[in-house]
């Protein structure tokens, strides 16, 4: 969490957290997109995966465009809110560590 916070704080890379109220993403969904490949993986209740490979170039580039502008959209928490969430998660982890000792 500390590394994520550092990346967000310094903006060495764009790191933001999607707002589940405005952009709900199921926990069981994974989207991987590059310029040369893309796949969508869905984890099912029966402990198996359903995977779709996206071969169409225009669809891949559409996903890339969408993901490129997503951090600047209203679907994503602001930098300040992202840092706040990471700080809260870090505090909870520290509390759990103290409980375990």
Image (spheres, grey):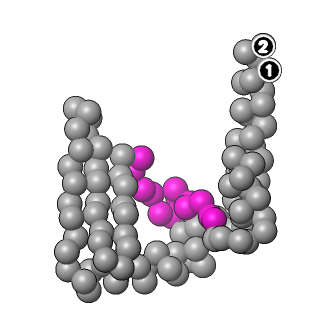
Which stretch appears magenta?
A: 15-27
Q: Is residue 66 visible?
A: yes
Between 8 and 24, the one nearer to me in the picture? 8
Which quadrant: the C terminus? top right
Horizontal arrangement in the rendering, residue 49 relative to residue 9 (left or right): left
What residue is rendered at 29% in x and 54% in y? 41
Label ID, residue 81: none
Query: Quick one: 62 or 85, which is closer to the camera?
Result: 62
Residue 13 lies in what quarter of the image? bottom right
Residue 7 lies, in percent from the top left, at 71, 62
Are there few (<14), some (14-19), or many (20+) residues within 10 Å of tag 1?
few
Q: For the residue labelled by badge 2, is the local secondary structure a helix, a strand or a loop?
A: loop
Q: Judge by depth and name the residue closer to the eye, 36 or 96.
A: 36
Q: Is residue 81 visible?
A: no
Judge left or right: residue 67 versus residue 44.
right
Q: Are marks 1 and 2 in contact (CB under 8 Å)?
A: yes
Let me know if residue 71 is in the magenta part: no
Q: What secondary structure predominates along the stretch shown in magenta?
A: loop
Where's residue 86, x and y in %? 71, 50
Circle 2 sits on which residue? Answer: 101
Where does label 1 land, which residue? 98
Q: CA distance from mark 1 to mark 2?
A: 5 Å
Look at the image and say whether residue 16 sits in the magenta stretch: yes
Q: Residue at x 19, y 74 (%)?
A: 55
Image height check: is 81 above or below 66? above
Q: Residues within 10 Å of mark 2 (few under 14, many from 20)?
A: few
Residue that extends furthest to the bottom in the rendered view of this protein = 58
Q: Secondary structure at mark 1?
A: helix
């Amino acid at each position: 969490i500390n590394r994520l916070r550092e990346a967000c704080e310094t903006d060495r890379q764009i790191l933001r957290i999607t707002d589940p109220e405005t952009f709900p993403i199921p926990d069981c969904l994974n989207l991987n997109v590059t310029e040369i490949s893309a796949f969508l993986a869905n984890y099912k209740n029966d402990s198996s995966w359903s995977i779709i490979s996206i071969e169409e170039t225009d669809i891949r580039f559409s996903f890339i465009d969408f993901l490129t502008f997503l951090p600047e959209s209203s679907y994503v928490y602001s930098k300040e809110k992202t840092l706040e969430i990471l700080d809260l998660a870090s505090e909870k982890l520290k509390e759990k560590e103290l409980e375990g000792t």
